[in-house]
Image (spheres, rainbow, N blue to C red):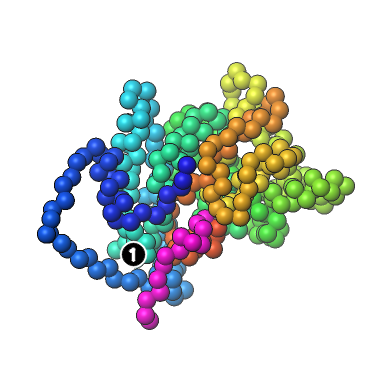
Amino acid sequence: LKSITEQTNLEEFLYEAEAAEKDFVAEKQNIQVIIQQVANSTSISQEKERELLEKIENNKLLATVPRRSMSAKELHQLESQSFLEWRRNLAKYYISWPHNRLEEDYLMTPFEKNLDFWRQLWRVIERSDVLVQIVDARNPLLFRSPDLERYVKEVGEDKKNLLVLNKSDLLSKEQRAAWVEYFEAEKLDFVFFSATLAAEKLENADCVSEEVANDKTKILDAFELTEFFKNFSQQISNNSEQKTVGLIGYPNVGKSSTINAMAGEKKVGVAATPGKTKHFQTIILDSELCLLDCPGLVLPSFATTKAELVVNGILPVDQLRDSLGPS
């Protein structure tokens, strides 16, 4: 299973033709040369960036998550048609990098174009009682998908959403306090976590946390995160004693490392290159809690440059195709 976030115009055209089940015939001796202007997409002023960020905020509802068809009849075809419709809708706002600036002059980011990856997400959402978005604590709003949270509620009103801010050890306590204030104002459930610190604590069992247990800025360890998941999932009223928690996140936010820390051993593969997990995996921690690890997904979003995605670890550096035009 290979993640696809970049496609040439020809690949995009062929995919749409195949998904729509349409045949096409090439016209011979009808050659057109299309020249694209080089976009100076990696160098913008601070004033321009502030302007773009304001426009992104006003249009963030355009960055949606594709819905799975709920009909069991001809499911494969219905999923493909639904996915194609979603891609066509986003195509109004997206042009291949590095020339994908909209008329408003900001960027729609590359996003996952492999339908099989989205099928993994749909199945994880359907099976889970709690959907956890694991985000990078240094830039959580870039990694959080509000539309994904809405979709979870569409699938099941009783399902819960939760944010886990991984890599929280890279934030100061003052920064964590600022995020506490923000997320509480937004009425979002969240916890701070660090897979790195959790792994170190497993190796050094004698180390003691100096943070107060009821401090909302506290960085939970693996045991505390597991207990939090158990208590949080008890809000859901179903007959199952074992609750299922689905873990979703961008590539390289530390999702697999979080699972390994909670399990106390290596359960899923971890790599420096984003996108190690390819299929959703089931990890049974105990009789009370089961984890579903969804492959890392690059969700539709907006950014000022593609370099921002590479710097944030969302895309591998070998996918950087931005060209710097003459100033």
Could you tell me if residue 239 is visible in this image? Answer: yes
Residue 148 x/y as whole percent: 47, 41
Magenta stretch: give its range.
314-327
Q: Is residue 60 left or right of residue 214?
A: left
For label 1, count other residues whose C-alpha is less than 10 Å away and answer few (under 14), some (14-19) or many (20+).
Answer: some
The residue furthest bottom is: 327
Considering depth in this image, is 173 or 317 the residue closer to the camera?
A: 317
- At 12% across and 59% down in the image, what residue appears? 30
Relative to 113, say whether 157 is above or below.
Answer: above
Residue 314 x/y as whole percent: 52, 55
Whether residue 19 is in magenta: the answer is no
Whether residue 323 is in magenta: the answer is yes
Considering depth in this image, is 204 or 193 the residue closer to the camera?
A: 204
Residue 62 x/y as whole percent: 37, 50
- In the rendered image, which residue does mark 1 sit on? 99
- At 71% across and 28% down in the image, what residue appears? 286
The residue furthest front is: 28
Secondary structure mostly seen in magenta is loop
Considering depth in this image, is 74 or 211 the residue closer to the camera?
A: 74
- At 67% across and 59% down in the image, what residue appears? 171
Secondary-structure class at tag 1:
loop
Considering depth in this image, is 59 or 319 the residue closer to the camera?
A: 319
Q: Quadrant of residue 236?
A: top right
Q: Is residue 102 left or right of residue 303?
A: left
Residue 186 x/y as whole percent: 54, 47
Q: Quadrant of the C terminus?
A: bottom left
- At 73% across and 40% down in the image, what residue appears? 265
Give the residue type that dot 1 points to.
Answer: His
Q: Quadrant of residue 51?
A: bottom left
